[in-house]
Image (cartoon, rainbow, N blue to C red):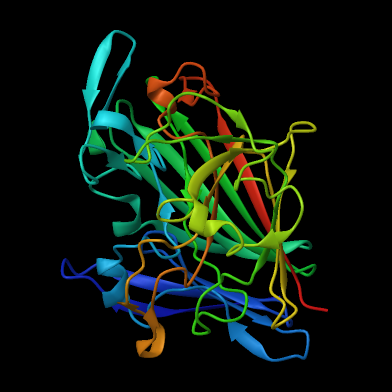
Amino acid sequence: MKIKEKTFGVLSNGKKALLFTVSNGNMSFSVTNYGCIITSIVVPSQKGKKDDIALGYSTLDGYIRNGPFFGALVGRYANRISNASFSLTGNRYELTKNENTTCLHGGKPGYHKMIWNAESFSNTRESGVLFRRTSKDGEQGFPGNLDMKISYSLTAENDIIIRYNAKTDAPTPVNLTNHTYFNLAGHDSGNVLDHQVQLFCDRYVPVDAHAIPSGEILDVAGTPFDFRSPKAIGKDIDGIPGGFDHNWEINRAGAGPNPVAGVFDPSSGRTLTVYSTQPGVQFYTGNFLAGEIGKNGESYGKNAGFCLETQHFPDSPNRPEFPDSILLPGDHYRQQTIWHFDFE
């Protein structure tokens, strides 16, 4: 296992962004302390050809813009909060409206636009990078000081493990996830509509035209949301206005990590299997990509990548019927997601 560190760039305020590359000899990933952003995942194909399967940018300047949230850590509350507000402990909290009247991925300032403290680590099982940051009371409009530790690591078994840890001094919603866009054929290979996807989920959360949940959790049987058996992303996508951008309820056999999803790319033979302790997963098919210029000048069009954002349900602070997303003082937020890659 190897970890390399270099300067990725310097922000206008003089702060330095670092880039860490972690390799196990078979595959590697790179992550920067600017927003805890995963900038690349290099994996061999069935025939041994190595490709970068994560959408993103070649330089720090791209990530400073990063409208699509490529590779980003998002929080304090990932996904959407309706009307950019919620009530908690008798108080009303107003957040940033950054998608119509909605607060998306915590609003502003985004966690993906901040420098995090970072240090590499290595043990007998894995090597990676640990990031730390305190989100101050009132940042983005959320209550409480939130102390966070996020680690990204790689094992010899080709697992990328993301661990999320947080503590607070006041009740607050917490929902942290990573927003990597995958294209298992390679970031520059076109759309992902032929990727075969299986979701270990019997139910999904319907949403309105603004992607806000109705509060229902419905069976996937007989709907385009049924991915219980592997099927191509493109098979039923035309039946969903705009494409898939929904939360599924993960079938839970225990505390986890539970199986979440399996994705197979027939052109490269690569497989991604996802496990998580989280209750939900947002399956997003890159519907809003429209020619974003990424690595090496590549133009990412609609459906150029997919996301599997393990998470609490969207708008949970306003939906008592959803799994509880409130972190209390004295409690410890612990979540873990594993991406296992197979290319043999």
User: How many marks do you count on the picture?
Assistant: 0
Q: Is residue 169 visible?
A: no
Residue 61 percent location from the top left of the image:
26, 76
Location of the N terminus by quadrant is bottom right
- Depth order, front residue of 157/324: 324
The image shows residue 293, relative to residue 153, as above or below, that is: below
Q: Please tell me which residue is depicted at 21% across the width and 43% down the height of the picture.
A: 100
Taking the image as shown, residue 104 lies to the left or right of residue 204, namely left
Taking the image as shown, residue 220 lies to the left or right of residue 63, namely right
Q: Is residue 134 visible?
A: yes
- Depth order, front residue of 209/274: 209
Quadrant of the rendered image containing residue 148: top left
Location of the C terminus by quadrant is bottom right
The image shows residue 163, relative to residue 324, as above or below, that is: below
Residue 166 percent location from the top left of the image:
49, 36
Q: Please tell me which residue is depicted at 42% across the width and 59% down the height of the picture.
A: 72
- Depth order, front residue of 58/49: 49
The image shows residue 182, relative to residue 28, as above or below, that is: above
